[in-house]
Each structure stands twice: as structure tokens, then as C-alpha cells.
Image: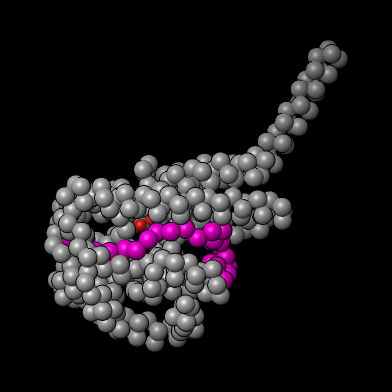
Amino acid sequence: MYQTLGKTLFGAVAAVTLFSSAASADTWRAWNIHNDGHPNTAAMDRFAELINDATGGEITMDVFHGGVLGSQPDAIEQVRIGAIEIGNFNLGPIGPMVKEANLVSLPFIFKSVPHMFRVLEGEGGEIIASAMGDAGILPLAWIDAGARSFYAQKAINTPADVEGLKIRVMNNDLYTAMISAMGGNPSPMAFGEVQQALKTGVVDGAENNFPSFKNVGHFEVTTNYSLSEHLIIPECICVNTTKFNALSAEMQAAVRGAAEEAAMFQRELWAVQSEQARKDVEAAGIAVNEVADKGPFQDAMASVYEDYLSANPDMRALVEIAQATE
Ligand code: GTR
């Protein structure tokens, strides 16, 4: 009897010890919209390995690909409230929730991808990161998403070519304003619905970078991709702020380091795979049109800037920082 009780007690103590060490390890859920074959999917898988190694297994990560944890606007909200810990987000759909993030959604605000990174790595990036952190979605590292261009069943060489077309955009009023300014009909829609909408003619066109154009089969239901490069929108690896702040300084450094390394890996993959995606869609028959003069597109955006800045005069300083960055 005593022995049995002793064994039972010993078993209970052992279980408690085991349980408490398991409880100190944390499993984070990570959101990713992309599928296999997209550079961000490989980068998020790599991030899971890096975070596990850097934290000595104290933080492990289950990455859910293909947007299965929800649409991007929903997932951003879930990270903000802590229902999902971490995600790879595009800054476009963050803009409606964090005003400062909208800088990157002003068409043609960046001259090139390297210029975009220079702005993010300077004072502009600090302002955006701190506003995002305050809103509950803290960026740990910035990643590359190239430039977005229009695709439709015809070439789009001038803003007039957009006139009358129904174009899918991400959820952000700046994108609806951008399409309207060219005389098109903007149609905000979740990424997962775009292929079907293009196929059935619910929309006439959309806009994205080459890897997304290829990876979710938009190229299968389109004929022309025109290099307008009107938006250069960065993405982030973003974590719930409260969760991150609750970590020790040492763990915070480990998590940040892992995110930065995963971001570097993503940028290398992006460079190679976005080139390859372009070649693949061309080989599949897509006509890729160089836009000889982007000037008319830029001119058409004057009213978008005017309306936006008169409604949000506090964004003027951030726009000036970006414009003054070499
Ligand atoms: C992709 C981006 C996704 C998503 C998508 C879209 O380029 O990586 O996060 O924003 O575009 O158009 O919705």
C-alpha cells in the first residue's frame, strides 16, 4: 500500500516536472499565404528551423501555409490580438490598421527595391516599425516582394488602357483610389479568390509580382503581363507584440536573429526565383510587355497623393522622408 502510494506519488511528481518543462517551451503558430514553390514558403520553413535552434527548442513554430488560418486581413487581426503568434505579411493590407504602414502603398513612392530597403532601414522604417509594434504587430525583419505590375487579357501600356477594366486589388483604399484614378473599376478581393475571378471574367485583370502571378496559376487565365511596376510593397515577418515583449532579452535577441537570418535567406531566394518565375510564365505563353514610359502612370497618381495627403496631413512628413532618401 505504502509502496503503491509512494510509486503513485513519485509518478505524479515526475509528471509535474515533465509537464512544467514542456510548459516552458512554447509552440507558435505562423501564418503564410503562399504554397510550396514560392520563396516565402521555403523561407518560413527555414525560419521554423532557425527559431528552434536559436532558442534551444524553447520556441518551436508550426507554419501553416496556403492561408489556411484565414485571409490576410483576418490573419493580421489575429496576430494583433495574439490568436496567431507570427506571420509573413504584406504591408499593403496592414495600412488600413496602421496608418504609417500606408507609406508603402502610395504608388511609385519607391524608385526601386533597393531604394525601398534603404527607406525601411532608415528613419522611415523606424517610424513604421514602431507604429506597427504599438498596434500589436511588431516587424522583426523586412522581406522582398519585388514590384507589382498589371496583368489582363491585353497589354497595359498607358493608364488609358486601364479605363473601363475591372481590376482586382488588395484591401486598401489607396489601391481602389489608384485604379479609379486611371478610370478603371477596382475590385478588392482576397488573394485566394483571384484565380477563379480571372477565369470566370468577374474581373478583367489584377496586379502582382511574378512569383505570385505564377504560383497560384493567375498566368493560366491571363495573356499579358505589363511591367508598370506601380507598387513596390515590402513584406514583414511580424510577431504579436505582447508575446514578444514577454520574452527575456536573450530570447528576444534569439527570435529577432532567427527572423533576420530567414529574411536574408528569403531575399536570396527571391532574386533567383522571381527571375525564374518570369521565364516560366513566358515559356507558358504570357506576353511580358516592357512599359516604355511610366511617366503617364505616375502623373495619373497625382490626385491619389493629393487626396490622401489632404485627408492625412500627418503622413506628409513620412512621405518627405521617403522622397528625400537617396
Ligand atoms: C502577394 C503577397 C501576398 C498577398 C498577395 C495579394 O504578392 O505576397 O501576401 O498580399 O500578393 O495580392 O493579395
Given residues 249 and 108, the one toward you in this image is: 108
Q: Position of residue 83 (x, y in %)?
A: 53, 51
Residue 115 is covered by the magenta coloring: no
The answer to whether one can see residue 60 in this image is: yes
| Region rendered in magenta | 126-152
Q: Residue at x 34, y 74 (%)?
A: 107
Residue 167 place in picture, x, y as percent: 22, 65
Q: Is residue 126 left or right of residue 275?
A: right
User: Where's ligand 1: which quadrant?
Assistant: bottom left
Q: Is residue 133 magenta?
A: yes
Image quadrant where residue 162 sits: bottom left
Q: Is residue 75 above or below residue 92?
A: above
Image coordinates of residue 208 in percent, x first then y, are 30, 60
Where residue 230 sits, quadrant-wise, is bottom left
Q: Is residue 229 above or below residue 301?
A: above
Q: Nearer the viewer, residue 71 or 270?
A: 270
- Using the image as rendered, state which of residue 73 and residue 222 is in the foreground: 222
269 up-or-down from 103: above or below: above
- Can the viewer see residue 188? no
- The residue shown at (72%, 56%) is 249
The structure residue drawn at horizontal position 37% and vertical position 61%, both measured from the top left corner, is: 146
Q: Nearer the viewer, residue 199 or 110?
A: 110
